[in-house]
Image (cartoon, helix red, strand yellow):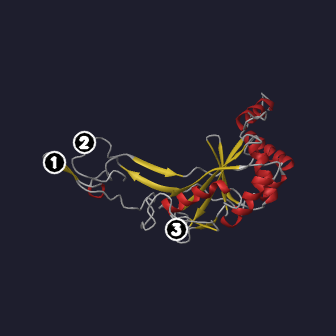
Protein backbone atom coordinates (compact mmCIF):
# COMPACT_ATOMS: atom_id res chain seq x y z
CA UNK A 1 0.00 0.00 0.00
CA UNK A 2 1.13 3.57 -0.59
CA UNK A 3 2.26 5.69 2.35
CA UNK A 4 0.58 8.72 0.81
CA UNK A 5 -2.71 10.01 2.09
CA UNK A 6 -5.73 9.11 0.02
CA UNK A 7 -7.75 12.04 -1.37
CA UNK A 8 -10.36 11.48 1.36
CA UNK A 9 -7.69 11.54 4.10
CA UNK A 10 -6.12 14.65 2.60
CA UNK A 11 -9.48 16.42 2.57
CA UNK A 12 -10.11 15.39 6.18
CA UNK A 13 -6.71 16.76 7.18
CA UNK A 14 -7.43 19.98 5.34
CA UNK A 15 -10.75 20.25 7.19
CA UNK A 16 -8.97 19.79 10.55
CA UNK A 17 -6.55 22.58 9.68
CA UNK A 18 -9.36 25.07 9.10
CA UNK A 19 -10.23 27.46 11.92
CA UNK A 20 -12.92 25.67 14.03
CA UNK A 21 -14.65 29.01 14.61
CA UNK A 22 -14.89 30.63 11.17
CA UNK A 23 -16.40 34.03 10.71
CA UNK A 24 -20.12 33.90 10.09
CA UNK A 25 -21.72 35.46 7.07
CA UNK A 26 -22.79 34.56 3.54
CA UNK A 27 -19.32 35.24 2.12
CA UNK A 28 -17.43 32.89 4.45
CA UNK A 29 -17.77 29.82 2.21
CA UNK A 30 -16.83 31.75 -0.93
CA UNK A 31 -13.80 33.20 0.83
CA UNK A 32 -12.63 29.77 1.93
CA UNK A 33 -13.05 28.42 -1.60
CA UNK A 34 -11.06 31.34 -3.02
CA UNK A 35 -8.31 30.74 -0.45
CA UNK A 36 -8.05 27.06 -1.44
CA UNK A 37 -7.97 28.02 -5.13
CA UNK A 38 -5.17 30.49 -4.45
CA UNK A 39 -3.22 27.85 -2.52
CA UNK A 40 -3.56 25.28 -5.31
CA UNK A 41 -2.31 27.81 -7.88
CA UNK A 42 0.92 28.08 -5.89
CA UNK A 43 1.46 24.37 -5.26
CA UNK A 44 0.12 23.04 -8.60
CA UNK A 45 0.62 25.83 -11.17
CA UNK A 46 -0.03 23.66 -14.23
CA UNK A 47 -3.64 22.82 -13.37
CA UNK A 48 -4.64 26.00 -15.18
CA UNK A 49 -3.46 24.35 -18.43
CA UNK A 50 -5.50 21.20 -17.85
CA UNK A 51 -8.44 21.84 -20.16
CA UNK A 52 -8.58 22.32 -23.91
CA UNK A 53 -11.51 24.71 -23.32
CA UNK A 54 -13.94 25.58 -20.56
CA UNK A 55 -15.60 22.28 -19.52
CA UNK A 56 -19.28 21.88 -20.31
CA UNK A 57 -22.02 21.37 -17.78
CA UNK A 58 -23.23 17.83 -16.91
CA UNK A 59 -25.26 16.37 -19.76
CA UNK A 60 -28.67 14.72 -19.54
CA UNK A 61 -28.40 11.61 -21.69
CA UNK A 62 -31.87 10.11 -21.19
CA UNK A 63 -35.25 10.69 -19.57
CA UNK A 64 -37.53 7.73 -18.92
CA UNK A 65 -41.09 7.58 -17.69
CA UNK A 66 -42.91 4.69 -16.07
CA UNK A 67 -41.61 1.20 -15.35
CA UNK A 68 -43.49 -0.76 -18.02
CA UNK A 69 -43.85 1.94 -20.64
CA UNK A 70 -44.55 5.68 -20.98
CA UNK A 71 -47.15 5.45 -18.23
CA UNK A 72 -50.15 6.22 -20.41
CA UNK A 73 -51.42 2.73 -21.20
CA UNK A 74 -54.90 1.91 -19.82
CA UNK A 75 -55.11 -0.76 -17.17
CA UNK A 76 -51.75 -0.06 -15.50
CA UNK A 77 -52.58 -0.66 -11.84
CA UNK A 78 -48.98 -1.24 -10.73
CA UNK A 79 -48.54 2.32 -9.48
CA UNK A 80 -45.30 2.63 -11.43
CA UNK A 81 -46.79 4.48 -14.39
CA UNK A 82 -45.92 7.87 -12.93
CA UNK A 83 -42.23 7.18 -12.41
CA UNK A 84 -39.93 9.77 -13.96
CA UNK A 85 -36.15 9.35 -14.00
CA UNK A 86 -33.47 11.51 -15.57
CA UNK A 87 -30.07 10.04 -16.38
CA UNK A 88 -27.18 12.50 -16.05
CA UNK A 89 -23.48 11.84 -16.59
CA UNK A 90 -21.24 12.59 -13.55
CA UNK A 91 -20.65 16.31 -13.34
CA UNK A 92 -17.48 18.29 -13.98
CA UNK A 93 -15.09 18.59 -11.02
CA UNK A 94 -13.01 21.74 -10.80
CA UNK A 95 -9.56 21.69 -9.16
CA UNK A 96 -8.44 21.22 -6.47
CA UNK A 97 -9.40 17.55 -6.68
CA UNK A 98 -7.80 16.55 -3.37
CA UNK A 99 -4.76 14.52 -2.32
CA UNK A 100 -2.62 12.89 -5.00
CA UNK A 101 -5.27 13.58 -7.62
CA UNK A 102 -3.90 17.14 -7.79
CA UNK A 103 -0.30 15.92 -8.07
CA UNK A 104 -1.12 13.59 -10.97
CA UNK A 105 -3.32 16.10 -12.80
CA UNK A 106 -0.72 18.85 -12.41
CA UNK A 107 2.07 16.69 -13.85
CA UNK A 108 -0.15 15.51 -16.72
CA UNK A 109 -1.05 19.11 -17.57
CA UNK A 110 2.62 20.13 -17.40
CA UNK A 111 3.72 17.43 -19.85
CA UNK A 112 0.68 17.50 -22.19
CA UNK A 113 -1.04 20.90 -21.82
CA UNK A 114 -4.71 21.09 -22.73
CA UNK A 115 -5.22 17.33 -22.91
CA UNK A 116 -8.55 17.22 -21.03
CA UNK A 117 -12.02 18.27 -22.07
CA UNK A 118 -13.22 17.77 -18.49
CA UNK A 119 -12.41 15.89 -15.27
CA UNK A 120 -14.82 14.04 -13.01
CA UNK A 121 -14.18 12.87 -9.44
CA UNK A 122 -17.01 10.52 -8.56
CA UNK A 123 -17.21 8.00 -5.71
CA UNK A 124 -13.53 8.34 -4.92
CA UNK A 125 -12.35 7.74 -8.50
CA UNK A 126 -10.93 10.27 -10.96
CA UNK A 127 -11.72 10.20 -14.68
CA UNK A 128 -9.91 12.37 -17.24
CA UNK A 129 -11.88 12.97 -20.44
CA UNK A 130 -9.10 13.22 -23.00
CA UNK A 131 -9.07 15.02 -26.34
CA UNK A 132 -8.73 12.34 -29.02
CA UNK A 133 -5.62 13.82 -30.64
CA UNK A 134 -3.80 13.96 -27.28
CA UNK A 135 -4.37 10.36 -26.16
CA UNK A 136 -1.22 8.68 -27.46
CA UNK A 137 1.14 11.42 -26.24
CA UNK A 138 -0.57 11.38 -22.86
CA UNK A 139 -0.29 7.58 -22.59
CA UNK A 140 3.47 7.78 -23.19
CA UNK A 141 4.11 10.28 -20.40
CA UNK A 142 1.77 8.43 -18.04
CA UNK A 143 3.87 5.31 -18.53
CA UNK A 144 7.35 6.87 -18.62
CA UNK A 145 7.41 9.87 -16.29
CA UNK A 146 8.83 9.01 -12.84
CA UNK A 147 6.20 11.09 -11.03
CA UNK A 148 3.37 9.27 -12.82
CA UNK A 149 4.59 5.78 -13.76
CA UNK A 150 1.28 4.18 -14.77
CA UNK A 151 2.91 1.00 -16.06
CA UNK A 152 -0.21 -1.08 -16.65
CA UNK A 153 -3.28 -0.57 -18.82
CA UNK A 154 -5.65 -2.86 -16.94
CA UNK A 155 -8.43 -2.72 -19.51
CA UNK A 156 -9.83 -0.96 -22.56
CA UNK A 157 -13.60 -1.02 -22.96
CA UNK A 158 -16.41 0.80 -24.72
CA UNK A 159 -19.68 2.50 -23.80
CA UNK A 160 -22.52 3.50 -26.11
CA UNK A 161 -24.68 6.53 -25.27
CA UNK A 162 -27.08 6.91 -28.24
CA UNK A 163 -28.60 10.10 -26.79
CA UNK A 164 -25.23 11.90 -26.46
CA UNK A 165 -25.17 13.51 -29.90
CA UNK A 166 -21.72 13.58 -31.58
CA UNK A 167 -20.22 11.79 -28.56
CA UNK A 168 -22.13 8.53 -28.73
CA UNK A 169 -19.14 6.19 -28.31
CA UNK A 170 -16.70 6.29 -25.39
CA UNK A 171 -13.38 4.45 -25.24
CA UNK A 172 -12.44 3.86 -21.59
CA UNK A 173 -8.93 3.09 -20.33
CA UNK A 174 -8.20 1.89 -16.77
CA UNK A 175 -4.59 2.58 -15.78
CA UNK A 176 -2.64 1.27 -12.77
CA UNK A 177 0.58 2.56 -11.23
CA UNK A 178 2.29 -0.28 -9.39
CA UNK A 179 5.08 2.09 -8.35
CA UNK A 180 2.78 4.57 -6.61
CA UNK A 181 -0.24 2.31 -5.94
CA UNK A 182 -2.65 4.58 -7.85
CA UNK A 183 -5.45 4.10 -10.36
CA UNK A 184 -6.90 6.58 -12.84
CA UNK A 185 -9.33 6.36 -15.74
CA UNK A 186 -9.04 7.95 -19.18
CA UNK A 187 -12.08 8.36 -21.39
CA UNK A 188 -12.25 9.50 -25.02
CA UNK A 189 -15.59 10.59 -26.50
CA UNK A 190 -16.12 9.81 -30.19
CA UNK A 191 -18.67 10.72 -32.82
CA UNK A 192 -20.58 7.69 -34.09
CA UNK A 193 -19.92 8.96 -37.62
CA UNK A 194 -16.14 9.08 -37.00
CA UNK A 195 -15.33 6.44 -34.34
CA UNK A 196 -11.54 6.59 -34.75
CA UNK A 197 -8.92 6.90 -32.00
CA UNK A 198 -5.21 6.06 -31.88
CA UNK A 199 -4.33 2.61 -30.61
CA UNK A 200 -2.37 2.54 -27.33
CA UNK A 201 -0.81 -0.84 -28.17
CA UNK A 202 2.55 0.82 -29.02
CA UNK A 203 2.62 2.09 -25.42
CA UNK A 204 0.69 -0.68 -23.64
CA UNK A 205 1.06 -3.96 -25.57
CA UNK A 206 -1.32 -5.66 -23.13
CA UNK A 207 -4.17 -3.58 -24.62
CA UNK A 208 -4.03 -5.56 -27.89
CA UNK A 209 -6.88 -8.00 -27.21
CA UNK A 210 -8.87 -5.36 -25.27
CA UNK A 211 -8.95 -3.04 -28.28
CA UNK A 212 -9.95 -5.91 -30.55
CA UNK A 213 -12.87 -6.76 -28.26
CA UNK A 214 -13.94 -3.11 -28.04
CA UNK A 215 -13.90 -2.88 -31.85
CA UNK A 216 -15.82 -6.17 -32.09
CA UNK A 217 -18.53 -5.20 -29.59
CA UNK A 218 -18.85 -1.42 -30.17
CA UNK A 219 -17.28 -0.58 -33.53
CA UNK A 220 -14.60 1.79 -32.18
CA UNK A 221 -11.71 1.84 -34.68
CA UNK A 222 -8.25 1.91 -33.09
CA UNK A 223 -5.94 3.40 -35.70
CA UNK A 224 -2.47 1.86 -35.75
CA UNK A 225 -3.52 -1.41 -34.09
CA UNK A 226 -1.32 -4.26 -35.39
CA UNK A 227 -4.28 -6.52 -36.22
CA UNK A 228 -7.73 -5.08 -35.57
CA UNK A 229 -9.95 -8.09 -36.25
CA UNK A 230 -12.92 -9.60 -34.46
CA UNK A 231 -12.13 -11.63 -31.36
CA UNK A 232 -15.53 -12.84 -30.08
CA UNK A 233 -17.80 -12.85 -33.13
CA UNK A 234 -17.13 -14.62 -36.47
CA UNK A 235 -15.12 -12.61 -38.99
CA UNK A 236 -18.13 -12.21 -41.28
CA UNK A 237 -20.48 -11.00 -38.53
CA UNK A 238 -22.43 -7.83 -39.32
CA UNK A 239 -22.77 -5.18 -36.62
CA UNK A 240 -21.49 -4.70 -33.07
CA UNK A 241 -23.58 -6.56 -30.48
CA UNK A 242 -23.08 -4.41 -27.36
CA UNK A 243 -24.31 -1.21 -28.94
CA UNK A 244 -27.71 -0.16 -27.64
CA UNK A 245 -29.13 0.09 -31.16
CA UNK A 246 -28.19 -3.50 -32.00
CA UNK A 247 -31.27 -5.74 -32.53
CA UNK A 248 -31.84 -8.32 -29.79
CA UNK A 249 -32.83 -11.01 -32.26
CA UNK A 250 -33.95 -14.40 -30.95
CA UNK A 251 -36.45 -17.01 -32.03
CA UNK A 252 -39.82 -18.07 -30.55
CA UNK A 253 -39.57 -20.73 -27.83
CA UNK A 254 -42.47 -23.17 -27.70
CA UNK A 255 -43.83 -24.75 -24.54
CA UNK A 256 -46.80 -27.03 -24.06
CA UNK A 257 -49.81 -24.90 -24.84
CA UNK A 258 -47.85 -21.64 -25.07
CA UNK A 259 -45.02 -19.88 -26.90
CA UNK A 260 -42.58 -17.18 -25.78
CA UNK A 261 -41.92 -14.65 -28.57
CA UNK A 262 -38.39 -13.43 -29.34
CA UNK A 263 -37.24 -10.30 -27.46
CA UNK A 264 -37.86 -8.01 -30.43
CA UNK A 265 -41.58 -8.88 -30.32
CA UNK A 266 -42.10 -8.66 -26.59
CA UNK A 267 -43.40 -5.74 -24.59
CA UNK A 268 -40.83 -2.93 -24.14
CA UNK A 269 -39.43 -2.46 -20.62
CA UNK A 270 -36.81 0.20 -21.33
CA UNK A 271 -38.95 3.32 -21.70
Quarter holding residue 33: top right
Q: Characterize the local packing of mark 1: few (<14), some (14-19) or many (20 or more) Cα atoms within 10 angstroms.
A: few
Outermost residue on the right side: it is 42
Front one among 32 and 116? 116
Front one among 112 and 51? 112
Write the residue at 79% across / 51% down: 106
Q: Earlier in the sequence, mark 1 or mark 3?
A: 3
* Residue at the spot of label 1: 258
Q: Is residue 17 left or right of residue 65?
A: right
Outermost residue on the left side: it is 257
Q: Characterize the local packing of mark 3: few (<14), some (14-19) or many (20 or more) Cα atoms within 10 angstroms.
A: some
How much space separates mark 1 and mark 2, taking CA atoms? 25 Å
Q: Nearer the viewer, mark 1 or mark 3?
A: 1
Outermost residue on the bottom side: it is 193
Q: Which mark is residue 192?
A: 3
Query: For the residue labelled by badge 2, is the local secondary structure a helix, a strand or a loop?
Result: loop
Coordinates of residue 259 in the picture (x, y in percent): 19, 50
Amino acid sequence: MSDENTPAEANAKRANDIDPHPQAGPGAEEGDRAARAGEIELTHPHLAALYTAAPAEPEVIATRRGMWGPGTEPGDTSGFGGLHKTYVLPGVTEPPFGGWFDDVADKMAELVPGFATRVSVHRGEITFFVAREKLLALARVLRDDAALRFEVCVSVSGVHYPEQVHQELHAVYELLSITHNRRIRLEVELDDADPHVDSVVPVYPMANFHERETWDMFGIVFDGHPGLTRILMPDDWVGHPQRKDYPLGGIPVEFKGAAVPPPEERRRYDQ
